Amino acid sequence: MGKVIALSNQKGGVGKTTTTVNLAASLAIAEKRVLLIDFDPQGNASSALGVDRNAMKDRPTVYHALIGQAPLSQVIVPTEMECLFVAPSDGDLAGAEIELVSAFAREAKLKAAVAEIKDQYDFILIDCPPSLGLLTVNALNAADSFLVPLQCEYFALEGLSQLLHTVSLIRQSLNPKLEEEGILLTMFDGRNNLANEVVKEVRTHFSNQVFETVIPRNVRLSECSSFGKPVLLYDIDSKGCLAYLNLAKEVLARNQPKTQAQPGLSAAPVLPPPAQSASVSVAADPR
Ligand code: ATP
Ligand code: MG
């Protein structure tokens, strides 16, 4: 069965989509079969993986799967990477929040859609919108775990308690097995004292819930999406690419089957050694 991870933070622009796309690609290069579900009406993850908006016009999207007009399997399209697939979205998805208001089991629509394809993937990553509305509730209900990208800036922790409160409500009422995948510090600039303070504070408060890997601010990460490519296919030597490969390594290590020996990491020979100091010491240069 695939592991479903929802990437969520109701704060906008914190690196959810960048993380979903590049973690998905980094897991796919380690020969994991990965599906990215674009669950944001902005459709940024779809564009970042090269989905042509015009070609999508006559195809079903995640919206159609959510309202029961098409199975999710018909929505999924391949990407440039062999093991990476995407279920694209567009602005229609915004309508689903309203259309589903009176629907029976409206919080479980995505979960039902995912159930049909879950066993075909090793990982299913859901890119959530910047809100805690019905779409995010659907994502957290469909997920086995949630990952919170947190931008290294002054108000980073603002809103996190609201997200964790939503998670606890979802655990109580809908999805008691929802686990924490971890908190990921993003857009770190080592030259900025404040960023260093934020890293310290988050590590103090959340200790081992925080990934060792810290994603640096790196211009290649913002450039690659306008080319419709994950950074792996755009600049494999960039610091941003290295950081997401390290994140994938951590995610793989956290998700090793407990009963087996640990052969999984050898399936990821491209992954460099743990990022720890690299991640904290890197300055935001272009590569
Ligand atoms: P939204 O809430 O609107 O969905 P988001 O949380 O998904 O936003 P992203 O779209 O991933 O955030 O990132 C916001 C902007 O910051 C984008 O322009 C992206 O290219 C850029 N960005 C993200 N991560 C980095 C990084 N590590 N270094 C430099 N730029 C980054
Ligand atoms: Mg986004």
Image (tube, rainbow, N blue to C red):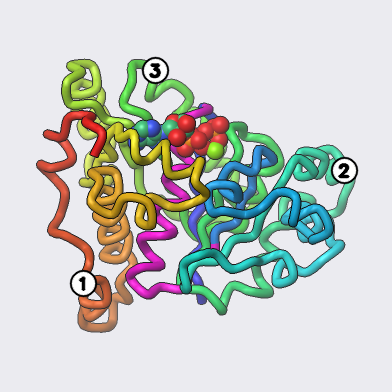
- Residue 277 shows up from this direction: yes
Horizontally, is 100 left or right of 273 in the view?
A: right
Q: Earlier in the sequence, mark 2 or mark 3?
A: 2
Classify residue 76 by image quadrant.
bottom right
Residue 248's image quarter?
A: bottom left
User: In the image, what residue type sits under mark 3?
Assistant: Phe
Stretch of the chain drawn in magenta: 12-35
Crowdedness near tag 1: few (<14), some (14–19) or many (≥20) residues, C-alpha within 10 Å: few
Residue placed under numbered mark 1 in the picture? 269
Secondary structure under tag 1 reads loop
For label 2, the SS is: helix
Is residue 102 in the magenta section?
no
Q: Can you identify the residue that label 2 sits on?
A: 99
Query: Tag 3: Cα neighbours inside 10 Å, few (<14), some, or many (≥20)?
Result: few
Q: Which amino acid type is marked by label 2? A: Glu
Q: CA distance from mark 2 to mark 1?
A: 46 Å
Q: Give the residue at mark 3.
A: 155
Q: CA distance from mark 1 to mark 3?
A: 37 Å
**Ligand 2 falls in quadrant:** top right
Magenta stretch contains residue 17: yes
Q: Residue at x 53, y 42 (%)?
A: 167
Helix, strand or loop for disc 3: loop
| Residue drawn where x is 23% and y is 81% of the image | 263
On screen, residue 59 versus residue 48, left or right, reads: right
**How far is disc 2 from disc 3 in space, using C-alphas?**
34 Å
